[in-house]
Structures are given as C-alpha cells and as structure tokens.
Amino acid sequence: MPTEFHGRRVVGGKARGLALVSPEPICFLGGVDVKAGKVTEVGHPLYGKSIAGKVLVFPTGKGSTGGSYLIYEAAANDVAPCAMINRSVEQVTAIGCIIAEIPIIDGLDVDPVVAIHDGDLVEVDADMGIVRVLEPERGGSR
C-alpha cells in the first residue's frame, strides 16, 4: 500500500521515479555537472551520484541565481531530475523548475528528507500537492 504525503505545489506536473535523497542543500551552480547530471560538490553526500531522471529530495537549494538557468540546462541536456521535493523551496530552485518545467513540491506534512529514502519509487502529483511512496527502500522497511 502506498504511503501518501501532502504538500504545496510550487510547479505543477506529474512524474514518477526513484528517489535520490540528500540531507544537505544542493547548489546547482558549481555543485552539479549539468552536462552529465552528476553532483560534483566535493564533500556533498550525493557527490558523484546522478540526478538524471530521479525524484530529487533535498532540504532547499543554495547558491547563486545562475543555478536557475543551470537547472534548465540540465533539463535541455536530458539529465535533470524528473521532479523535486524540498522541505522549503527557495527562489533559485523554484525559478529553475519553472523554466525547465520540472514538477516541485515543498512543505510536506512530513520531513521529506527523513520520510523518503534513496531508491524508493516515488510518484509526484504536484498539481494536487501529493507525493506517494510506492515501494519501500530496497533492503529496508518502512
């Protein structure tokens, strides 16, 4: 049975993919290779991991306004996340998702960084503000 959470639609749309979860903020300017779709910020928990096609779950974005365009560039290169979930979205990430047409939700009724795990199959219906976890973390239990 899926686990369902509710939050605030920031950018509408629907997506489904495997979760990639970071307990730390992400900087798209200098912290993500938008040609390869990999996190490049040394010391970041997701260093070296691919964001391409994932439901990217992280507390909030950080860094310069150039990050908005880089989210768009990652989408143009087909290496962007299929959706994003934040505790609290900030302007750079929100604008990037708007121009890249990536669904994003924030303000869930749970902390998404704790409630969603790497590898969970997640369905995002940002139009309705709903996140569904369809499968538990591989090898783990809910």
Image: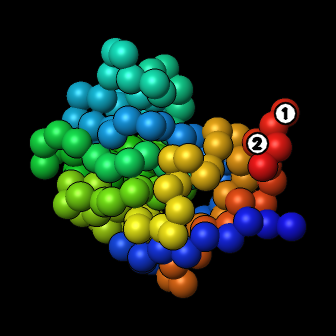
Residue at mark 2: 137
Tags 2 and 1 touching, CB below 8 Å: yes
In 3D space, how far apart are the residues under numbered discs 2 and 1 (Cα atoms)?
6 Å
Residue 74 or residue 142, whichever sits in front: 142
Q: Position of residue 22 (x, y in %)?
A: 47, 37
Left or right of residue 138, residue 41 in this image: left
Is the residue 20 above or below the residue 132 in the image? above
Q: Residues within 10 Å of mark 2 (few under 14, many from 20)?
A: some
Residue 74 or residue 110, whichever sits in front: 110
Furthest-top residue in this view: 42
Left or right of residue 21, residue 75 in this image: left
Residue at mark 1: 139
Query: SS at mark 2?
Result: loop
Please name the residue shown 61% across and 70% down the image: 5
Asked if one can make out residue 33 in the rendered structure from this viewpoint, the answer is yes
Quarter occupied by residue 92: bottom left
Q: State how the image is colored.
A: rainbow
- The amino acid marked with disc number 2 is Glu
Please name the residue shown 78% across and 49% down the image: 142
Is the residue 87 above or below the residue 77 in the image? below
Q: Position of residue 95 (x, y in %)?
A: 24, 63
